[in-house]
Amino acid sequence: MSKKEHKEEEKQDTPQAEREVSATADSFAETHDGEDENAGGEEPGDLSMKLDELNDKYLRLYSDFDNYRRRTLKDIGDIRKNASEDLVVKLLPVLDDFERAIKAFGATENAQALKEGIILIFNKFMTVLSNQGLEQMKTVGEDFNTDFHEAITNITAPEKMKNKVMDEVEKGYLLNGKVIRYAKVVVGS
């Protein structure tokens, strides 16, 4: 008995719904005739093994991602915690200079030498900060700009100085082009 005859015999013994399902399966088998024979008719044990294998891969991938996320969060926390270390190390020589200057206050009475020493320390301090991207804002004589300046008060001024900064009460600073402190200024009106 051939395959086709066997199928015809089965069709007569089965109800209509089962025959339609069987016909659909037969047409699928005919269109995929040259493919792997186990692809459409895998055993339940094989499917269970594949399911277990895929589930295991999923759990491993999820675990790897979770470990990566935790490690990344820890690294970011460490970076934030130690971000200023480089700057502090560069400022330590300035701190040493200030300590020497304080000791020199008691050992000398030459005010001019102390003043020059303090100016040298200030210049060294500003050099370190400017190498890190800090800039002082230019304010006096500039047009008043709310993006950089904070007006404390207005004073009457000649016509050419209206809406210009007349005086600086507190310096403003930029760090790598971003305002980190607005300049407190007196504006002419």
Image (cartoon, grey):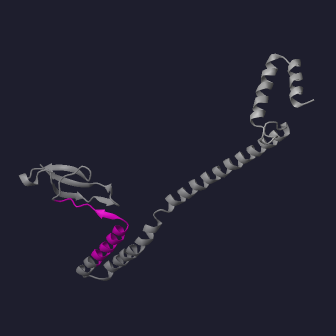
In this view, the residue in front, 18 or 47, is: 18
x and y, in percent, of residue 155 in the image = 12, 50
* On screen, residue 57 above or below 125: above
Q: Main secondary structure of the magenta part?
A: helix
Q: Which residues are magenta?
A: 117-140
x and y, in percent, of residue 43 in the image = 85, 37
Q: Is residue 171 magenta?
A: no
The reply, left or right, for residue 48 in relation to residue 150 is right
The reply, left or right, for residue 6 in relation to residue 111 is right
x and y, in percent, of residue 103 in the image = 36, 78
In this view, the residue in front, 6 or 137, is: 6
Q: Is residue 127 magenta?
A: yes
x and y, in percent, of residue 7 in the image = 86, 26
Q: Residue at x 84, y 36 (%)?
A: 44
The reply, left or right, for residue 163 in relation to residue 117 is left
Location of residue 127 (image quadrant): bottom left
Q: Residue at x 80, y 39 (%)?
A: 47
Where is the N terminus found, in terms of image quarters? top right
Q: Residue at x 71, y 49 (%)?
A: 60
Location of residue 142 (image quadrant): bottom left
Location of residue 6 (image quadrant): top right
